[in-house]
Amino acid sequence: MGEESNVFTNALGETIIVQVKDKVDSTAKLLEKVLDGNEKAAKLLAEQVHSSVTLSNTVTSQLPANLIDSFAEVGVWIDPIGRCN
């Protein structure tokens, strides 16, 4: 599991359901389990998930008006293509 799903099984055989927690540290701890203890990567990903994004009017003016009602509805998909050490 894990491909286009929020359910992952790590190297220890633990099944983890990935979700955004209330705080960066909580999300990072959860991601750390998926990433086989890679604390640095987990923290970097969690910080990005919890960060605020502001798009300039230049960018948003180029989008179709009916694309989305609110940028709060926008999500990010991270598609790892290989393992980095």
Image: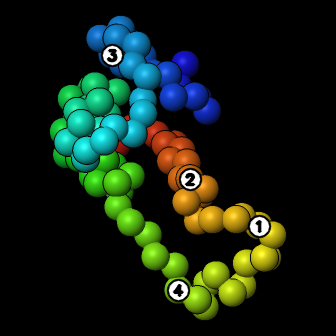
Cβ atoms under marks 2 and 1 closer than 8 Å: no
How far apart are the alpha carbons under marks 2 and 3? 27 Å
Where on the picture, by quarter, is residue 65? bottom right
Res 40 quadrant in image: top left
- Name which residue type carries label 1: Leu
Q: Marks 2 and 1, Cα distance to the nearest angstrom?
A: 13 Å
Q: Are marks 4 and 2 in contact (CB under 8 Å)?
A: no
Q: Residue at x 69, y 87 (%)?
A: 61
Seen in the picture, residue 84 relative to 15 is either above or below; the reply is below
Residue type marked 4? Ser
Q: Is residue 62 above or below residue 45?
A: below
The mark nearer the N terminus, 4 or 1, is 4
Q: Residue at x 25, y 47 (%)?
A: 24
Q: Residues within 10 Å of mark 4 (few under 14, many from 20)?
A: few
Question: Is residue 85 something one can see in this rendering?
Answer: no
Specify which label sits upstream in the sequence, 4 or 2.
Answer: 4
Residue at the disc numbered 2: 75
Label drawn at residue 67: 1
Residue type, numbered disc 2 = Gly
Instruction: Estimate how packed mark 1 is, as few (under 14), some (14 to 19) or many (20 or more) residues with alpha carbons within 10 Å.
Output: few
Q: CA distance from mark 4 to mark 2?
A: 18 Å
The residue tagged with tag 3: helix, strand or loop? loop
The residue beneath circle 4 is: 56
Residue underneath mark 3:
11
Residue 51 location (% of width, % of height)? 35, 61
What type is the residue that disc 3 sits on? Ala
Q: Residue at x 60, y 56 (%)?
A: 73
Q: Nearer the viewer, mark 2 or mark 3?
A: 2
Secondary structure under tag 2 reads loop
Q: Secondary structure at mark 4?
A: loop
